[in-house]
Amino acid sequence: MSLSGPIALFLDMQAVERGASRHTLDAYGRDLADFEDFLSVRDHGIDAASTDDIRAYLAELTDRGLKATTVARRLSAIRQLYRFLYAEGRRGDDPAAVLEGPKRGRPLPKVLNVDQVTRLIETAHDRAGEDAPPPERLRRLRVVCLVELLYATGLRISELVSLPAAAARARDVIMVTGKGSKERMVPLSGPAKAAMTAYLAARAESGLAVSKWLFPTAAESGHLTRQHAARELKDLAVAAGVPPQALSPHVLRHAFASHLLAHGADLRIVQTLLGHADVSTTQIYTHILDERLKSMVRDLHPLSGE
């Protein structure tokens, strides 16, 4: 994929200054290359495109039958490109600044209720307490550790499986490296710390080689893969009587956020814990805040019962 100078400069900035992943850079590159191809038909380049050009491109995307989410993503890439070119002095204006994206409803995240999460955790502990050969008991203790940590911290599964073994020595918080190599501190609950301690003790007893990873495996990365962790959770869901299709590592992350908000946590605090760069990402949970506000008015307003 051959990219023009402005696009190449923008991608370099994303990689160097924002730590964008190869997947993100490839996605930006594809979207902006398609926009550039459209401009070439109109005898314009990226540097000379107008607001009308961008508007015409968005209309064409709709005519192609692309989903509103895809059109919005393309517009987001174009906006970021022109914001960058304007800041760098390559353009004296920002032709994308006045454009609005297509209206789209944001799907609500799948969430388990507290009873379902409780069943998962209790089942994981019960299975780990059963008599089983050492290798199987170690695997079950690892599942306990996974589910306790996911629900206690709201970590992305990629962040969880790549935790160093040193995380188990943390007293109250762990340092997590998230998207864009940004670090954040996440508090640890008592059950999560206990689960890590029990799992590491069993690992030491098994005679396995010392590893720098909390969840080491023979995988190329040296640690448990996201896919393997997801399969372990599906197996746990079946044992706990929770529909396996309703459970994934990300669903437990949503449960962490949703249950915190439902019990009074501040949205900005949850944003920090989840590692969201922008609070707008966290606002998918505002329906929970709306319900909490309604219940507060219903239960606390002096005239609500009249």
Image: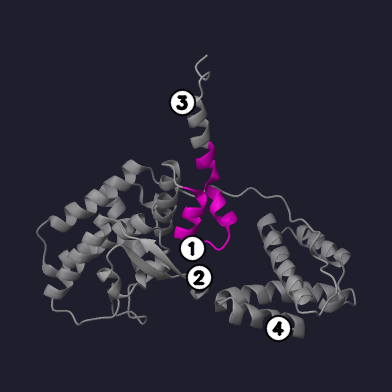
Cβ–Cβ under 8 Å for marks 1 and 2: yes
- How far apart, in angstroms, are the residues tagged by discs 1 and 2? 8 Å
- First in sequence: mark 3 or mark 4? 4
Name the residue tied to disc 4: 9
In magenta, the rendered stretch is: 266-290
Mark linked to residue 299: 3
- First in sequence: mark 2 or mark 3? 2
Amino acid on which the number 2 mark rests in the picture: Lys
Secondary structure category for the residue under label 1: loop
- First in sequence: mark 1 or mark 2? 2
Name the residue tied to disc 2: 179
**Position in image of residue 187 (x %, y %):** 35, 60
Name the residue tied to disc 1: 275
**Position in image of residue 232 (x %, y %):** 30, 62
- How far apart, in angstroms, are the residues tagged by discs 1 and 4? 27 Å
Which residue is depicted at the point 34% across and 72% down? 163
Residue 296, relative to residue 146: is it above or below?
A: above
Residue 188 visible to an observer of this rendering: yes
State left or right for residue 195 relative to residue 33: left
Q: Main secondary structure of the magenta part?
A: helix
Cβ–Cβ under 8 Å for marks 2 and 3: no
- How far apart, in angstroms, are the residues tagged by discs 2 and 3? 40 Å
- First in sequence: mark 3 or mark 1? 1
Secondary structure category for the residue under label 3: helix
Q: Nearer the viewer, residue 25 or 165?
A: 165
- First in sequence: mark 2 or mark 4? 4
- How far apart, in angstroms, are the residues tagged by discs 2 and 4? 21 Å
